[in-house]
Image (tube, helix red, strand yellow):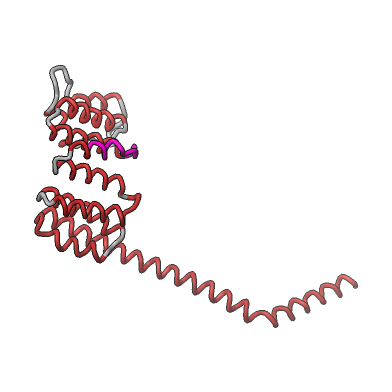
Amino acid sequence: MDVLTDDHEREEAVRKWWHEYWKPIALGVFIALAGLVGVRQYQSYMLGVHQEKAFEVYTHRLDLNNHGASAVNAAKEFMQQNEDIFGALLALDVAATQIDSKDYQGASESVDFARRFGGDLIATTASLTEARLKAQSGDFQGAIDVLNALSDESYIVEKNETLGDVYLAQGDKAKAREAYLKAVDEAIARKLAISPLLQMKADSVSQNGDEGVFRKVMQASATNAPLK
């Protein structure tokens, strides 16, 4: 009987508690659900914004590739309106175009923009572009110093290929050959595809006795897993 009485008292206590507090509990649940819906709507909105920005970056890149310096102003306008990773990515393409047109001051400003708004995500790519800029403007040692300071192993192939470009522009074919071959060897070791341009660069400075990049790649493909 005591047990039945205790159960009855507990039930009455629960009913009384629920009667007093159901409104704030329901309100809390509603706020939590509304917040969840709001977060999802915001995420959906941001995804749409990012997709739109990514498409605009792609469009400006095409214009830069097809029209060169005449497309720079429109790209810079996008950069000024998007001081974020999207503007930073486009800034690197703008810098490359400016380097080709010998606008070294403009290229330097674009690289600085990329660094400021791209952060660690594009820091290494920005340094590679900076090295090319210095080499094109005749500061070969400055370009070499920038490249030697790079520590990101995931860019080791690009680093050595760019070093080869700098040494070749400087007139040092021996060091250019060493850098290109190192880039090739690193690509093979990491099972990365070797671009035809890198292969051409390495073969252009080859010496008597070199087996050639194509033969190296074929040997690697025969003994190891396919290159990526």
Compared to residue 173, the image places residue 55 above or below, namely: below
Q: State whether the magenta stretch is mostly helix, strand or loop.
A: helix
Name the residue rendered at 14%, 32% in the picture.
168
Percent of width and height locating residue 65:
13, 53
Residue extending furthest top? Answer: 209
Name the residue rendered at 74%, 81% in the picture.
16
Residue 197 counted in the magenta span:
no
Percent of width and height locating residue 44:
37, 67
Q: How many discs mark residues in the rendered view?
A: 0
Q: Is residue 150 left or right of residue 217?
A: right
Query: Closer to the camera, 137 or 12?
Result: 137
Percent of width and height locating residue 219:
24, 24
- For the C terminus, which image quadrant? top left
The stretch in magenta equals: 144-154
Compared to residue 208, the image places residue 22 above or below, namely: below
Percent of width and height locating residue 145:
26, 37
Q: Quadrant of residue 15?
A: bottom right
Name the residue rendered at 18%, 27% in the picture.
177
Q: Quadrant of residue 91?
A: bottom left
Name the residue rendered at 12%, 59% in the picture.
71
Q: Is residue 3 left or right of residue 28?
A: right
Query: Closer to the camera, 140 or 178?
Result: 140
- For the N terminus, which image quadrant? bottom right
Query: Closer to the camera, 65 or 145?
Result: 145
